[in-house]
Image (cartoon, rainbow, N blue to C red):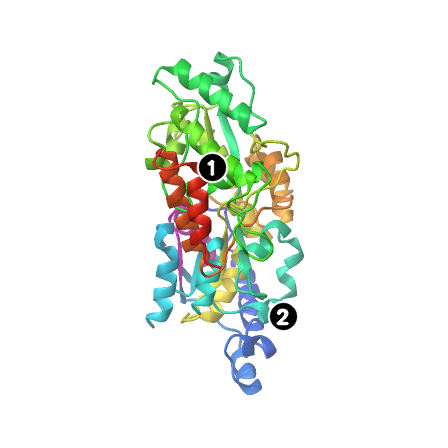
Amino acid sequence: MDTPTPRTSASAPARRSVLRAAAAAALTGPALTALGGTSAAAAATRATPPPDLEGVTLKVLCNTPHLSMYKNVLAPAWQQSTGGTLAATAVDYTQLADRIIQDVRSGTGEFDCFDYYYYMLGSIADAGALVDLTRWIDTQPDLDTGDFLKSVHDPYTVYRGRRYGLPYDGDQHLIFYNTELFGTYGLRPPRTWDEYDACARTITEGGGGAYYGAVVTGRPDPMVLGPAFVNRLVGYGGDLVDRSGRPTLTTDAALAAAQHLVDIAPYALPTPTETGLGTATDAFMAGQVALVETWTGVAQRAADPALSKIVGKWGVTALPLGGRTTRRRTPLNGGYGLGVSAAAKNRDAALAFIKWVTGADEMLAETTQKNSAIDPNRTSVLDSAAYAANTPVAASLIRAGLKGTPMVWPHGPADPGNLQRLVDQLALAIEGRQSAAAALRNAQAAWTP
């Protein structure tokens, strides 16, 4: 991770004044009522004088891949801008929702802000762990909400018509491929899942165990096997649920997607159902596999000689299409929002922070850090020359994906459990313990509305 973008000491007082004013505005009038205030008199008292963030310790709970950004980039910048301390704690994504809910419901209130996966939003909001920010956002015109990418703004922050956060990290998947291996076998980047199969089979058979054509992230976890299935599902023109939230797992598109995972497994890095995200990325950057479908941040890591053995030997392309599908959609695999804890001890500082950190200036600084795990949340950042220069090979594909019409994962209270049951069934099919059709029937039957 690079050192933080320099902030001169001369600019710090001005930046602190802006942030203090933002925090003060956050607690005036109707916005205070939305955040638990009780009277106009209380609003006037809280708004004057502006809250002083100097000396305040703001605590954030985040997912592990984001910790480096918080510690090495955001914390120094926040301290210089406000005089306050930003303390981030990271947990594995599998523990994130439970930790958030427990922190609030237990009364501990250790954290002021939560950095949450969007597919967990319904379960977190339904548990009462997040502050409803709908009215506060309406009082913050300088948030420039029109600049947030339409593809992620509502999916990452809205639950049952109320907004519980601001969009932070606009994740999507692309196909990365090893150009050296593709050249050895005279192959082209796959445009369809059938072409993907052919490439993987050719390279695996030619590799004799020294390298493999593909890697399938098949560990039965919603954020591991889930994207692998969804990438194929979208490619074949399918969805996880219909407009009413009912599962659509027994469609032809869903069956084609599940069957593809079963059929590609023999030509993938062993063993798919034990392969997680880190294993897949490491194998690709070591030159051990020719194809990997993963998050766009790999574009920066694969180009870094300190991390990658394939510098200058890789390319990237869009997710393949399948069957007769001609319309490409971006599946929103992952992605984060930033919300304020309902038990926050420093709510004014938390509001100021989420406004600052999701703003165009800070997001541009974050997305252009070396090996950044943060992707654009705003149109102005996505379209900037600086972002394109930092991600030159993949920038046009990233722009096309985030400006498209996305396939949004369901994110109601029951959906983390629904997705877990789906991947459990798919893993059994990949292992040959049941058919792809049986896996989908079982997952459909177990889906809770």
Between residue 415 and residue 105, name the one nearer to us: 415
Between residue 197 and residue 288, name the one nearer to us: 197
Compared with residue 124, is residue 45 higher up or lower down, i.e. above or below? below
Whichever of labels 1 and 2 marks the residue nearer the N terminus, that label is 2
Secondary element type, mark 2: loop
The residue lying at 54 percent from left, 46 percent from top is: 332
Q: CA distance from mark 1 to mark 2?
A: 46 Å
Magenta stretch contains residue 305: no
Which amino acid, mark 1?
Ala
Magenta stretch contains residue 76: yes
> Can residue 286 be seen in this snapshot?
no
Secondary element type, mark 1: helix
Between residue 359 and residue 285, name the one nearer to us: 285
**Could you say where residue 156 lies in the image, as x and y percent from the top left?**
54, 55
Q: Which mark is residue 175?
A: none
Reading the image, the residue beneath label 2 is: 139
Q: Quadrant of residue 54?
A: bottom left
Q: Quadrant of residue 316?
A: top right
Reading the image, the residue beneath label 1 is: 258
Tell me: 286 left or right of 164.
Answer: left
Front position among marks 1 and 2: 1
* Label 2 crowd (10 A; few <14 / some 14-19 / many >=20): some
Compared with residue 202, is residue 61 higher up or lower down, i.e. above or below? below
Q: Which residues are magenta?
A: 59-79
Which amino acid, mark 2?
Thr
**Could you say where residue 109 lies in the image, as x and y percent from the top left?**
36, 69
The residue lying at 55 percent from left, 36 percent from top is: 390
